[in-house]
Amino acid sequence: MAHVLPLLRAMTGATRRGLPFVDALFSNNFVIFAFLLSYEHPQYYRSFHLFLGLVILFPLSLDPMRSLPRERLSLLPLTSWDRIRLRLGSLFLSPVLWVAAGLLLFLGPRTLSKLWLVLAVPVLANGCALFLDTLRPGGVHRGRGLGMLSGRLGLLIKKNLREIFCLLDTYLAMSISVLGTLAIAWKPDPKQDLAAPVTFMVVLAVSTSAQQLFALDREAAARYRLLPLRGWEILLAKNIAFLVVLLPLVLFLTPLSGLVAGLCVLAIGNLASTAKAGPQLPWRLVRGASLAYSGGQVLLMALGFTACSELGPWALVPALFLWGGGLALGGRWFEKRYLG
């Protein structure tokens, strides 16, 4: 047991650090909008809340023993009973088990019919992790397919794309885009145009990540000083990566509104990212910089959708003006804070 206790403490610390920030659940634009939307009629949005909860639980469902390096674990003098104790301890450290127990305790037996959804999440999450582990030794690289990016900002854009795909907001937007597109194609309703609302939700899902463009590379500020780039160029590389991910998600919905809303989101995000950059863990929902920046993003998004319906393609002109102003001002703040 003496060999197992330090390993259990290490897994406990890794699990605790992996838990999402509480304020991320109350400062993320999509979460705030979802709860405000369902405040009046919560019975209409129960399935929506269940979907959001499953998305949040997905990265927390990985086996806690994955936090222990396999190479070092194989070198430890552990007996068969030690490994059994370690495995049982890792099961009790899984956040999904505690969520399931909490549902049974506070909501009663009536949740048994939906509890299988919560318990199916770790099976799917660990299955995907094992599948990726089998691919990794064969040389599959996360950056494959991005080698065509070249030029002055090519490497930065490639790095920023990898960071975006390590945020849970991106996969939330992907899920909404795919489900919304399939729903519109499967049952088209000529009386209601659902493409615009789905586009709004897709942009809203990734809008908070635009407030924390430097969330995953906050420690790389010293390295940016070594690059022959201005502050606005560094922000431009992050903006391009953001739009490269966003545009395919709204391509089959309302691409013009999605592009205009994305530019409006980045106009505020460039300022928030340099003024109030905060810590961020990968595979978690991004927490907003402040309610003021979140409110500004949502307001500009709504104005952008209204402008698209009234002006058509001409709505790109004020959107580009706002985005250019945010990029220039944010680049100046970045230079004073990190490059000065």
Image (cartoon, rainbow, N blue to C red):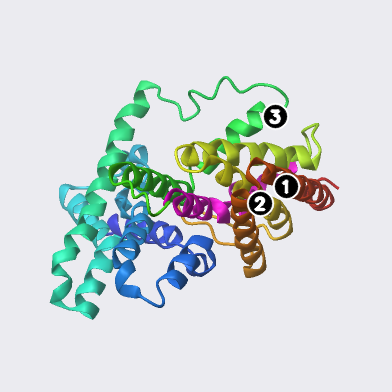
- Sooner in the amino-acid sequence: mark 3 or mark 2: 3
Kindly identify the residue that appears in the image at 37 percent across and 28 percent down: 136
Q: Which mark is residue 264?
A: 2
Residue 58 visible from this viewpoint: yes
Kindly identify the residue that appears in the image at 46 percent across and 55 percent down: 197
Residues at marks 3 and 2, CA–CA distance in whole angstroms: 22 Å
Examine the image and state in which quarter residue 276 appears. bottom right
Q: Tell me where the magenta segment starts and ends, as one range.
A: 194-222
SS of the residue under disc 3: loop
- The residue indicated by pointer 3 is 153
- Residue type indicated by callout 3: Leu
Our reading of the magenta stretch's main secondary structure is helix
Residues at marks 1 and 3, CA–CA distance in whole angstroms: 19 Å
Image position, residue 74 (x, y; %): 29, 39
- Residue type indicated by callout 2: Cys
- The residue indicated by pointer 1 is 323
Asked whether 268 or 108 is in front, the reply is: 268
SS of the residue under disc 2: helix
